[in-house]
Image (spheres, rainbow, N blue to C red):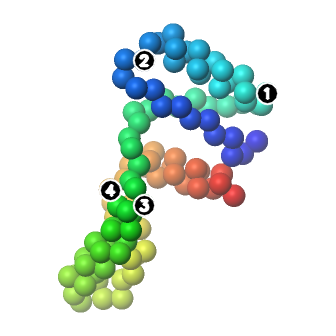
């Protein structure tokens, strides 16, 4: 059952019993198939405004400022290069599967 994705964010200090109860409820809502559980520190995602600034201001300025070294580069080229250089393998793997499961 691809695409089944349940997420809940807990604030610091949430009693362990409350977390366990919520996780148990999420698990019972899943189909009777194998599933994975991941626990990670939550980070607020970038806003649409931040993404628009990155793609519309920062990337074009970097390409323009790169002169001949970046001649012919697109914003996508720059983004792909930076993603490859700066994200961990786990982060890229997680996002690749999340994007695939949206279909």
Q: Quote the CA–CA distance across marks 1 and 3.
A: 37 Å
Compared with 74, 53 (above or below) is: above
Residue 102 picture quarter: bottom right
Q: Residue at x 51, y 10 (%)?
A: 17
65 relative position to 93: left or right: left
Q: Earlier in the sequence, mark 1 or mark 3?
A: 1
Q: Quote the CA–CA distance across marks 3 and 2.
A: 29 Å
Please name which of the two marks, 1 or 3, marks the residue nearer to the observer: 3
Contact? badges 1 and 3 (CB < 8 Å): no
Q: Quote the CA–CA distance across marks 2 and 1.
A: 29 Å
The residue labelled by disc 1 is 32
Please name which of the two marks, 2 or 1, marks the residue nearer to the observer: 2
Compared with 76, 40 (above or below) is: above
> Measured from the top left, where is residue 63 in percent x and y?
28, 81
Res 69 seen here: no
Q: Quote the CA–CA distance across marks 4 and 3.
A: 21 Å
18 or 77, nearer to the observer: 18
Label 3 residue SS:
helix
Label 1 residue SS:
loop
The residue labelled by disc 3 is 48
Contact? badges 3 and 2 (CB < 8 Å): no
Rendered-image quadrant of the C terminus: bottom right
Rendered-image quadrant of the N terminus: top right
Please name which of the two marks, 2 or 4, marks the residue nearer to the observer: 2
The residue labelled by disc 2 is 14
Q: Residue at x 46, y 52 (%)?
A: 92
The residue labelled by disc 4 is 86
Q: Earlier in the sequence, mark 4 or mark 3?
A: 3
Q: Residue at x 53, y 31 (%)?
A: 8
């Amino acid at each position: 059952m691809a695409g089944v994705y349940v997420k809940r964010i807990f604030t610091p200090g949430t009693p362990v019993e409350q977390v366990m109860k919520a996780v148990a409820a999420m698990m019972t809502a899943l189909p009777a198939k194998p599933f994975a559980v991941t626990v990670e520190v939550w980070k607020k995602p970038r806003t649409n405004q931040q993404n628009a600034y990155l793609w519309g201001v920062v990337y074009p300025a970097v390409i323009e400022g790169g002169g001949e070294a970046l001649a012919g580069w697109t914003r996508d080229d720059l983004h792909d290069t930076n993603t490859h250089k700066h994200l961990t393998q786990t982060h890229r793997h997680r996002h690749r599967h999340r994007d695939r499961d949206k279909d």
